Image: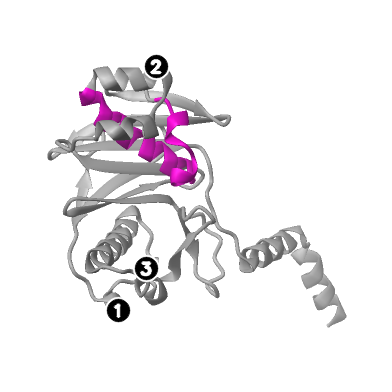
Amino acid sequence: MEIIPVDWDVGPRFALYRAVISDHNLQDVGLAIAEEVSTFKTEKRRKEHLSGRKLLYDALLHWGLNSPDEVEVRRDEYRAPSLAWMHGVWKNQPLPGLSICHSGEHVWVALIEPGWSIGVDVESGDRVISANALDLMAKGDELEMLRENPAQTIISWTSKEAVQKAMGKGMHFNPRDIVIPEGEGENKISIENLIFQLTNLSHMGNRIAISLVKKTRKVRVPEDDLLDATMEAMSSTDWGVGCNTTRNNA
């Protein structure tokens, strides 16, 4: 596992990790689910998935989570991933937000402190985006700018992907409705009353885009509601009175 340095002081704690995509045994990857892995059609997809879950496990340990074996990855209706405590663990400690992507021979994992959502996208710096794809990713002035500045295309491509992931909607949100300012560096983009922070950087020949937004993404299950209700009941109960009454009755 490699920890990627990111010089971006935006407030929330976040971290970016990278690892080589390699073959792993399913039983050795704690965050992998056999039923999900069994649906993959190619060996390449299987390796990418297992390598991503292995890197996520190692990243959580580095982050400071001592019990990744008690955590699972859940997906919402948009297939956006989030971390949750496994059924029966009965913990409500907030967990970090995450984003995973694959590029070339590597898998990348980004983590961010609870209360925030993060999106990361990585492409080889020498990748050429087809001119035919420009109409699918941009419109109006931005489209004309990309046609006149081909070098900006890969920056806009990865940036839009990162924002879509931070939003939690992926390609369910039209990339043409995300306008990326020309050039590299840090930007703030307003979408649906949310402010997405965005930065672009290079690392080992890769173009990396990272987007952050103050937003919690969590897939709730009935156990979460029961746990919250139990905690609320416990916090509203005068335990001292109960103990005194018990002692007096004794």
Say how many tags the image has: 3
Local SS, label 3 = loop
Residue lying at 43% horizontally and 31% vertically, measured from the top left: 176
* Visible residue check, residue 219: yes
Q: Earlier in the sequence, mark 2 or mark 1?
A: 1
Local SS, label 2 = helix
Task: Check if residue 120 falls in the magenta segment.
Answer: no
Residue 145, position in %: x, y? 31, 18
Q: Amino acid at mark 1?
A: Gln
| Magenta region | 150-179
Residue lying at 32% horizontally and 63% vertically, measured from the top left: 53
Q: Which mark is residue 31?
A: 3
Residue 139, position in %: x, y? 41, 24
Q: Amino acid at mark 3?
A: Leu
Residue bearing mark 1 = 27
Residue 169, position in %: x, y? 49, 45
> Which quadrant: the C terminus?
bottom right
Residue lying at 48% horizontally and 47% vertically, measured from the top left: 114
Q: Are marks 2 and 1 in contact (CB under 8 Å)?
A: no
Residue lying at 31% horizontally and 36% vertically, measured from the top left: 158
Of residues 126 and 237, the one drawn nearer to the viewer in this rendering: 126
Q: Earlier in the sequence, mark 3 or mark 2?
A: 3
Between the residue at mark 3 and the residue at mark 1, the CA separation in whole angstroms equals 10 Å
Position of residue 24 relative to residue 156, above or below, is below
Local SS, label 1 = helix
Residue 26, position in %: x, y? 29, 76
Between the residue at mark 3 and the residue at mark 2, the CA separation in whole angstroms equals 44 Å
Between the residue at mark 2 and the residue at mark 1, the CA separation in whole angstroms equals 51 Å
Q: Amino acid at mark 2?
A: Asp
Of residues 183 and 239, the one drawn nearer to the viewer in this rendering: 183
Residue bearing mark 2 = 141
